[in-house]
Image: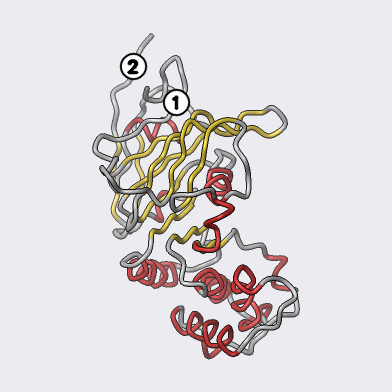
Amino acid sequence: MAPGGDQQTTVLPEGQSRAGEVPDVEIENCSFAFNSVPVLRDVNIRIYHGDFVAIIGPNGGGKTTLVKLMLGLLKPQKGRVRLLGSDPAKSCRRVGYMPQYSTGEKGFPITVMDVALLGRLGLTGIGCRFTREDREAALGALRLVGMEKYMNKRIGDLSGGQIQRTLLARALISNPEVLFLDEPMASIDIDGQSMLFDLLGELNKKMTILFVTHDVGLLSRYIKSIICVNETVYFHHEPKISPDMASLMMGTGEKCPVEMVAHGIPHRVLGRHERD
């Protein structure tokens, strides 16, 4: 049922299922609440290999919670989550995760190389010494995001865009099959956002990417699918905003005109007004 009906539920697009193919991410009938306050209701999602998914919605709508359920960092009160065909706890080492950047991290006395190496802890374990192989992998990840020449700089001396690229290197160091990015464009100027999207477009040729943002103006030509989250979840297997998704983002059952600007071009999303 689309948003605005009597019951809140997830809408799955036609043709999303692929016979015989195991989804990279699968969520079945999941609900989650904090202290009995509903955050997500009856979520059903299948994301297949090679997709580039934008997860959009208002602040506090449940986007980060949805990603943490996919990663196994949170457990649903109802339903089941599968990551790369198994329980997230068993497959989490095969994914990369770039959480939201906190400005408090700039004060931590650590170098760019050290930050990238932290991405190997899932493979080496805490307390183990990093090997030459680990350092070569870190250098390769930094080179991929254009940060190798800053490898010995302190994280606090970097710009916002440089920090984001360093955190991306940390997520890429283990060659993930699925890459999760939570608000990766924060603190990056327009040119930096364009460069990062170009890099993600290249990475998408070999991995599935899920990209969280509350700013619909950041949607790129590389996006293939959109998940709209505002307690309920609407999956649209096309890179465009539908009227139902727009009304869900606004938190209202009415379908009202919405205009957004993406890459400098106005896009109008229209739906007819409905009366009681």
User: At label 2, which amino acid type do we have?
Assistant: Glu
Residue that appears at 46% across and 50% down:
215
Between residues 98 and 189, which one lies in front from this camera angle? 98
Pointer 2 local density, CA inside 10 Å: few below 14, some 14–19, many at least 20: few
What is the quadrant of residue 122 in the picture? bottom right
- Image location of residue 182, percent across then percent down: 53, 56
- Residue 111 drawn above or below residue 29: below
Observer-side mark, 2 or 1, equals: 1
The single residue placed furthest to the top in the displayed view is 276
> Hey, what amino acid is under mark 1?
Thr
Tell me the quadrant of the picture where the C terminus can be found.
top left
Closest to the observer: 264 or 33? 33
Q: Circle 1 — which element? A: loop
The answer to whether 253 appears left or right of 223 in the picture is right
Quarter of the N terminus within the rendering: top left
> What is the spatial separation of the Cα atoms under label 2 and label 1, in whole angstroms?
20 Å
Residue at image coords 29%, 32%? 270
- Residue 198, given in percent of the width and then of the height, sits at 35, 70
As drawn, is 1 to the left or to the right of 98? left
> Eyeballing the image, is 264 above or below 124?
above
Q: Identify the residue position indicated by label 1 in the image.
A: 9
Q: Which mark is residue 186?
A: none
- Across the whole image, how many numbered discs are drawn on residues? 2
Q: Mark 2 or mark 1, which has the lower sequence index? A: 1
Residue found at x 56% / y 45%: 69
**Residue 254 picture location, percent across and down:** 40, 22
Label 1 Cα crowd, 10 Å radius (few <14 / some 14-19 / many 20+): many
Please give the residue where the numbered disc 2 appears in the rendered image: 274
Whether residue 9 is visible: yes
Locate residue 141, reporting x and y percent: 49, 79
Tag 2's secondary structure? Answer: loop
- Residue 250 visible in the snapshot: no
